[in-house]
Image: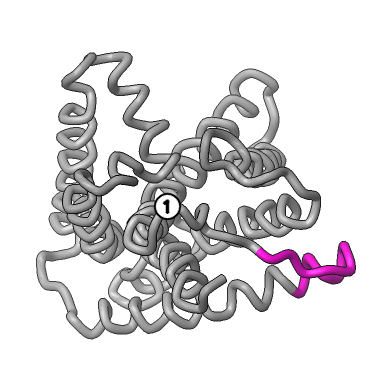
Amino acid sequence: MPLAPRIISDSPNSYWQASRAHRYSLLFALPLLMLYELLAALLSRDPSGGVRNGADVLIRSVFILIAGSRGPLFFGVCLIGVGIWLIGRDMRSHGRKLRAVFFARMAGESVLLALGFGIVVGTVTAQLLGVLPSLAIAPAEMGWWTTLMVSLGAGLYEELFFRVLLVSAIAFAARKVFSMRALPAGALAVVLGAVIFSAFHYIGAYGDDLELQSFTFRMIGGLFFSALYLLRGFGITAWTHALYDVFLLLSGQ
């Protein structure tokens, strides 16, 4: 599953198609990466410093196993290098001219989607369980700025890990190992990926207490983000996720 899955047969220069392409999607996600890393660096000396988003830590851990103490540097080089290669390849295919208005529209779309996410997923959860869970982004002792940093990282790294990498890997394994067709394999990957995404929030020192309501909400949220990723690409999905968490933080929940 690539960073910009092709399921919309629209003109490559239309907003709906171009905004999903690497030259727009990855460049749109770049400020999210920069903000997250800047806050992580500034907060590294804070009493709660050293905390990073869990998905970020998980991916970095793999690179540390491969390259030891240079693993984080190796990860950063790979992340930026692959991004530059994908953007360059896309620009060679579709031209180097970028339209600023597309980035503005992507920002507006992400804000609207983030505002609607809680309503849609909360309504579905309430219909299934008869109650709407109250979610905390992070423990209160973590601090406001650290929570903001973790929220931004959730949009970037959780979407990278759970949607781009994990769902793709499950779908690939289902096709190759169990000889499933593409559509059933994709459906299995999306559902199983959503379950793992939800369970991820209850693991580790900062994990939440496991509750049916919050687990269901997050699992449905995982399905929502998978559908959004397929329809609108990585950049908009990452910002939608990050902004939703930031809105929760600003609302004091």
Residue 69, position as x, y percentages in the image:
19, 18
* Residue 51 quadrant: top left
* Residue 57 quadrant: top left
Residue designated by label 1: 142
Which span is picked out in magenta? 123-134
Residue lying at 62% horizontally and 73% vertically, measured from the top left:
118
In the image as oriented, which residue stretches furthest toward the left? 96
Q: Does the magenta stretch include residue 130?
A: yes
Apparent side of residue 231 relative to residue 61 in the rendered image (left or right): right
Viewer-side residue, 158 vs 210: 210
Residue lying at 36% horizontally and 62% vertically, measured from the top left:
148
Residue 42, position as x, y percentages in the image:
17, 53
Residue lying at 69% horizontally and 66% vertically, measured from the top left:
134
Type of amino acid under label 1 = Met
Viewer-side residue, 224 vs 217: 217
Apparent side of residue 6 relative to residue 117 in the rendered image (left or right): left
Viewer-side residue, 246 vs 171: 246
Total residue callouts = 1
Neighbor class of circle 1 (other Cα within 10 Å; few <14, some 14-19, many 20+) is some
* Residue 189 quadrant: top right
Q: Does the magenta stretch include residue 210?
A: no
Apparent side of residue 189 relative to residue 166 in the rendered image (left or right): right
Viewer-side residue, 115 vs 110: 115
Residue 251, position as x, y percentages in the image:
51, 78
SS at mark 1? helix
